[in-house]
Image (cartoon, rainbow, N blue to C red):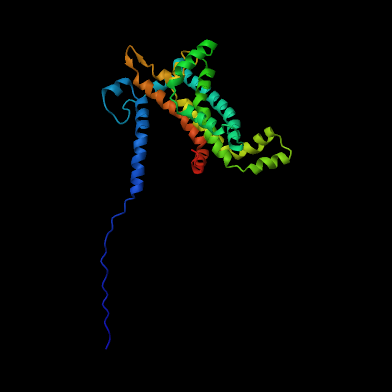
Amino acid sequence: MTDATVSHAPARTRSLPKVNSRAVVMTLYLLFLLLPIYWLLNMSLKTNTEILGSFTLWPRDLTFANYVTILTDPAWYMGYVNSLIYVVLNTVISLSVALPAAYAFSRYSFLGDKHLFFWLLTNRMAPPAVFALPFFQLYSSVGLFDTHIAVALAHCLFNVPLAVWILEGFMRGVPKEIDETAYIDGYSFGGFFVKIFMPLIASGIGVAAFFCFMFSWVELLLSRTLTTVNAKPIAATMTRTVGAAGVDWGVLAAAGVLTIVPGALVIWFVRNYIAKGFALGRV
């Protein structure tokens, strides 16, 4: 007598693909962030008639005339040149002052060091409008009004404290024994600082340079108050686009797109340093 085996095929159930909620949230967040940039680019490739006449998701009559206007009109492209000049000057000055100051705060204890450090940070907390009138009066008296160095020095008021605060955190992470070993090996302070110490905090210098560049690039009040013609930045030029025919929306949008480019390039070159800064908890 043989046993008969009966096999029952399991019922097949179709499972719906699981939706990754994190991916959905991140996608929506990126769309929310990129929408203004896309719309700015979209407007920059349109004529004023199309911008004011209808709502379109992309240009119907694609035009690069707005960019041609900016790149050929000295009133526009000199704004970018002026901004880059005083921003680079400010970044160099801020780092040159902040590096020795941060080293002193990280390596030495002296009378009033904590109070002085706190005072530096309070300069960063104060709004630029508080210092606009004193700077205007001072620079007008000494003949620095409407110059690139005037804006660069004014921006040091809030960039130097920020750079000192960032660099001091990175320097505290370097053991003091390295300083002592370098002196024993015969290094002078300048040789040790440039050849040994600065490479060790290269990521901190990159982070500090990035924030100095960005804060100086986007600041409007001081740069507009302290300049008129010779050093007028692009941010001030963009606020004076109203003419007899109204606002030139296409040119204004093109100027906005070109204003984003320098900041994006700086972020690209120092992205690894910024990541290290976040990892160390100082940024």
Q: Is residue 69 visible?
A: no
Does residue 234 appear to the left or right of 199 in the view shown?
left
Residue 234 lies in quadrant: top left
Residue 182 lies in quadrant: top right
Q: How many numbered callouts? A: 0
Q: Is residue 55 visible?
A: yes
Establish if 204 lies above or below 251: below
Viewer-side residue, 183 vs 278: 183
Image coords of residue 105 (percent x, y):
58, 34
Residue occupying the far bottom of the picture: 1
Viewer-side residue, 99 vs 229: 99
Image coords of residue 31 (percent x, y):
34, 38
Residue occupying the far front of the picture: 111
Residue occupying the far right of the picture: 186
**Residue at the image position 34 percent from the left and 36 percent from the top:** 32
- Which quarter of the figure is the N terminus placed in? bottom left
**Residue at the image position 54 percent from the left and 12 percent from the top:** 142
Image coords of residue 240 (percent x, y):
38, 16
Image coords of residue 280 (percent x, y):
51, 43
**Residue at the image position 42 percent from the left and 19 percent from the top:** 236
Does residue 66 appear to the left or right of 212 in the view shown?
left
